[in-house]
Image (tube, rainbow, N blue to C red):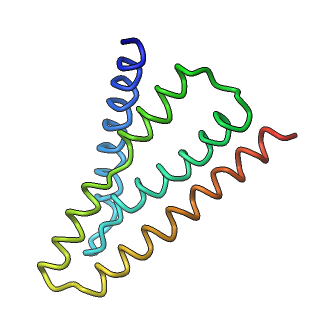
Amino acid sequence: MKNLFLIFLGSGIGGILRYGLGKYIQSLYLFSFPFSTFVVNIFACLLLGFVVYIVQQKNSFSTELNYLLLIGFCGGFSTFSTFSYEILQLLKTEKYIIAFLYIFLSIFIAVLSILVGVFLAKYFFNR
């Protein structure tokens, strides 16, 4: 029951931060490319890679922190359903090139961001 509460708490905080950051980023541009979801997803992947390395390689976090940060916060902060909906909207409005770029860049940079997160964790925790 404690683990469920930690997941609940982490995902709530992640969701609120995703909403706030998304609204802020959205206010900065006028393009049809969905930058706010893109940036939030990339940042979530970077954070996930960083936390995964610490949790799995260094055993620096307790199981409770794993539930709170990895499952809860990162899960609540990422926005795959929004990403999918935005692609559908781009396709419906016949913005095929933007939709393709969004899919390609999101997946490519997301995987790269996880690797960068792992690299940063190694750099900061292997000194």
With respect to residue 25, does 55 lie above or below? above
> Residue at coordinates 76% horizontally, 46% vertically from top-left?
122
Horizontal side of 58 relative to 105 (left or right) equals: right
In the image, 24 versus 81, the foreground residue is: 81
Task: Name which quarter of the figure residue 116 lies in.
Answer: bottom right
> Residue at coordinates 39% horizontally, 26% vertically from top-left?
7
With respect to residue 52, does 62 lie above or below? above
> Residue at coordinates 35% horizontally, 44% vertically from top-left?
18
Horizontal side of 8 relative to 64 (left or right) equals: left
Query: Seen from this angle, which residue lies furthest left?
Result: 92
In the image, 19 versus 49, the foreground residue is: 49
Marker count (numbered):
0
Residue 38 is situated, as x and y percent measured from the top left of the image, at 38, 62
> Residue at coordinates 32% horizontally, 43% vertically from top-left?
20
Residue 11 is situated, as x and y percent measured from the top left of the image, at 35, 32
Horizontal side of 10 relative to 45 (left or right) equals: left
Query: Seen from this angle, which residue lies furthest top?
Result: 2
Residue 106 is situated, as x and y percent measured from the top left of the image, at 42, 68
Report the quarter where the C terminus lies.
top right
With respect to residue 45, does 94 lie above or below? below
Horizontal side of 126 relative to 32 (left or right) equals: right
Residue 40 is situated, as x and y percent measured from the top left of the image, at 40, 53
Report the quarter where the N terminus lies.
top left
Query: Seen from this angle, which residue lies furthest right?
Result: 127
With respect to residue 113, does 94 lie above or below? below
